[in-house]
Each structure stands twice: as structure tokens, then as C-alpha cells.
Amino acid sequence: MELQLALDLVDIPEAKRLVQEVEPYIDIVEIGTPVVINEGLRAVKEIKEAFPNLKVLADLKVMDAGGYEVMKASEAGADIITILAVAEDATIRGAVEEAKKQERKILVDMIGVKDIETRAKELDEMGVDYICVHTGYDLQAVGKSSFEDLMTLKRVVKNAKVAVAGGIKLDTLPDVVNAQPDLVIVGGGITGQDDKKSTAAEMQRLIKQG
Ligand SMILES: O=C(CO)[C@H](O)[C@H](O)COP(=O)(O)O
């Protein structure tokens, strides 16, 4: 099980400062969608250059032109690129094909998918690397979580790695770990804490023992 730090509400200098603080405790650093919108793929490039030992995920949430977007993110140094599960199959297949060519990975974000079971089975057959259930900020605000969807993924996904994101905090992490995802994605649960270092260290401890 791996821990991914999601950076959403920062600029590049702040992203570097945050990663430096928690680097020993995380496996993957996510350059979040708002960061890519504000700073471009330069953010991916700079973080990969500054932290070559960490995997970098570019949270592009690709919806079209899968092959092209994956190629550009790969050029910037992304190890993993996200695509939306609600995209057309042709877009997903294009992204998977390009990622294989570039020796990168594709994480499919299930945000907005109503029938998790059916779509997860289809994506699994298409050869994506990760399938991620995700409660975005707008549904977190009305009290939703991804826990039930995570159980569905665990039941139906046979090939891809299973990931979970959306509002995970130290107090909810043990339940998430019990469900045995391959990847746990945490943003505000670390970046919003006064003591980010010890929060990330404790999260890593729970994840490694899970
Ligand atoms: O992709 C995202 C929002 O669309 C976030 O990166 C993801 O939800 C993790 O952040 P948090 O733990 O703060 O919810």
C-alpha cells in the first residue's frame, strides 16, 4: 500500500516546501488539477527535478485527446497521469497506449461515475494501471465519502491497482487501510494540519502496517 500526497492549493515554491517537509513519508506526490491550471506542466517538471526519487502524478483529469495529453505530461516528467472514467473508451484507450509507449502509468478517476461496478469492470479490461474512487470537494462538502465505492472496487477489479481519494484524514485512515486499497491519496488531511510532518509519518506507519 502506498501513500500519495495531493497538492491542490499551492504554487510551485509552496509545493516544494511541503514536499520537503514530508518527503520520507510519502511514495507519490500529486500535482493537483488547480496547480496544473495555475502553473501549467512546469509544476510537474520542477517537482520531478527537485525530488527525483518520488513518483510524480499529474492530476490532469483528461477528458479528451488522451494520447496527446499523456505524451505532454510524460515529457514534463510525470510518472502517473490521471484520466476521467467518464471519458469515451477511445480516449481511455489512447491514454493507455501512449502511457505504455512512454513507460508511464494511467490512473482513472471515477469521480462522477454513477455505476461504479460496471465502469470499473470495463476500465479494468482496457488495461488501465489504477482505478481510483474519489469524492471530490463538492460532495465532501455535503458529507459524502468514497468508502462504499472502495469496497465495490475491491470486489470487482481484478487487474488494476485500486486507489481511494477524497477527504481522508488521520482519524478515518484506519478504516480505509482495513479495506486494503493499493494507493491512498491524501491532500488536506496532511496539508491542512499544523504538524504536517508527524501527521504524514503517522499515516505512513498505519499504511505500512496495514
Ligand atoms: O483531486 C482532488 C480534488 O479533485 C484532490 O487532490 C483529492 O480529493 C485529494 O485531496 P483531499 O484529501 O484534500 O480531498
Image (cartoon, rainbow, N blue to C red):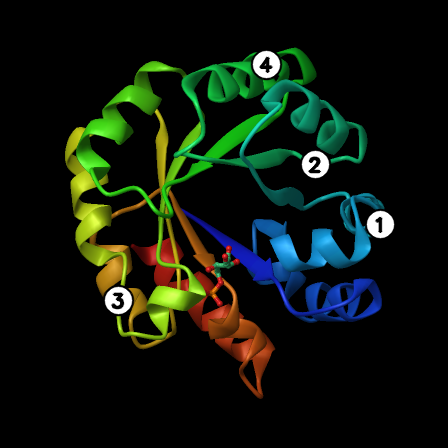
- CA–CA distance in space, label 3 to label 2: 30 Å
| Circle 3 SS class | loop
| Label 4 vs 1, first from the N-terminus | 1
Specify whether 108 is left or right of 19.
left
Specify whether 11 is left or right of 164.
right
- CA–CA distance in space, label 4 to label 1: 23 Å
| Circle 4 SS class | helix
- Compared to residue 54, the image places residue 20 above or below, namely below
Three-letter code, disc 3: Lys
The image position of residue 123, as x and y in percent, is 34, 23
Task: Count up the numbered dots.
Answer: 4
Question: Any mark on residue 144, and which?
Answer: 3
Q: Quadrant of residue 181?
A: top left
The image position of residue 2, as x and y in percent, is 45, 48
Question: For the point 81% across and 62% down, which residue is it?
Answer: 12
| Label 4 vs 3, first from the N-terminus | 4
Quadrant including the C terminus: bottom left
